[in-house]
Amino acid sequence: MSFASDCKKELCLLNPEKPCCRMSELSALYMTLGSLNLLGRGKLSVQFTGESMAVARRVYTLLQKGLELSPQIHYVSTAHFGGTRKCVLTLGPTQTPAFLSALGMMTVGENGEATLRSTSPKVNLNRSCCVRAFLRGAMLGGGTMTNPEQGYHLELGYRDENFRDCVAKCLQKVGLPIHQSSRKGKDFLYLKQSDQIVTFLTAVGAHQAVMEMENLRVQRQVLSSVNRAMNCDMANVNKTVDAALEQRRAIQILAPHISAN
């Protein structure tokens, strides 16, 4: 089990008590894992697709508790890359309008006619709790992280500029810099310093992951200090040995002259 997977499992156990936080996190999860599908005759469906079962359960819980929606669940296996198994959560045509309306993507008129206004959620990031919830959803849906034993690197992948701008705004609000890069046709924002990653994980609520990182950092600092002390002691020993050898050579040179006198 990777450090990133353990971190995501910890985040999936958190309970967002405020409705606004549920919607912010759900918005980020939709923008990373969701898709809007046209079924014909004006009917729409929404799907969330991901490899993590813990994240899939998280999406299901947010839909059920926050919006009283119950998506259908099925699994898809691919023959590529060792047969990856993905979980797909689907909201049918009867439930999709409620979901889209809750995320500000659809409006329903007095006559009951639904109108799709946007293909991206309307995210409110004025509250600090919603900022943290959105970042949590971004981490769960599109985040990856290097094991701290091997280095410090956290990425938040994105598919469109709207989501990128939302994540960048959230990072700024929690005091983190914005670094952007691309690799193999995929775009992402990233953090590479340990203190920045600790700030991010603290903001999203991954306190156990923060403790593990801090423990590893302390261990690394102690080992570094011990190695420096050992290297210093070894250098002093080498200097003492070199001085003793130099004295011995000097004695050997002077000894014949002293004996002759």
Image (cartoon, rainbow, N blue to C red):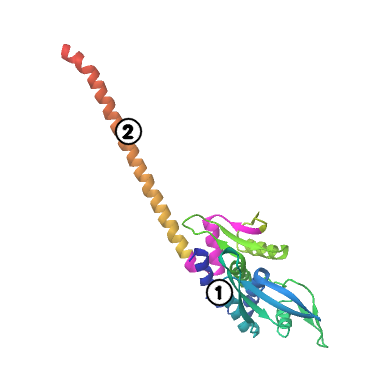
Position of residue 204 measured from the top left corner of the image (x, y, whole percent) = 56, 68
Judge whether 256 appears above or below 16 on screen. above
- Looking at the rendering, in which quadrant would you find the C terminus? top left
Position of residue 221 measured from the top left corner of the image (x, y, whole percent) = 42, 53
Does the segment drawn in magenta span residue 12?
no
Q: Which residues are magenta?
A: 187-209
User: Residue at the location (36% across, 41% down)?
Assistant: 232
User: Residue at the location (66% across, 58% down)?
Assistant: 186
Q: Residue furthest top?
A: 261
Circles 1 and 2: CB atoms closer than 8 Å: no
Q: Is residue 18 visible?
A: no
Circle 2 sits on which residue?
Answer: 239
Q: Amino acid at mark 1?
A: Met
Prevailing secondary structure of the magenta residues: helix
Q: Amino acid at mark 2?
A: Lys
User: Residue at the location (75% across, 72% down)?
Assistant: 119
Circle 1 sits on which residue?
Answer: 53
Q: Seen in the image, is 41 located left or right of residue 143?
A: right
Provide the secondary structure element on which disc 1 rests.
helix
Marks 1 and 2, the one that precedes in the sequence: 1
Does the segment drawn in magenta span residue 206?
yes
Provide the secondary structure element on which disc 2 rests.
helix
User: Residue at the location (64% across, 78% down)?
Assistant: 89
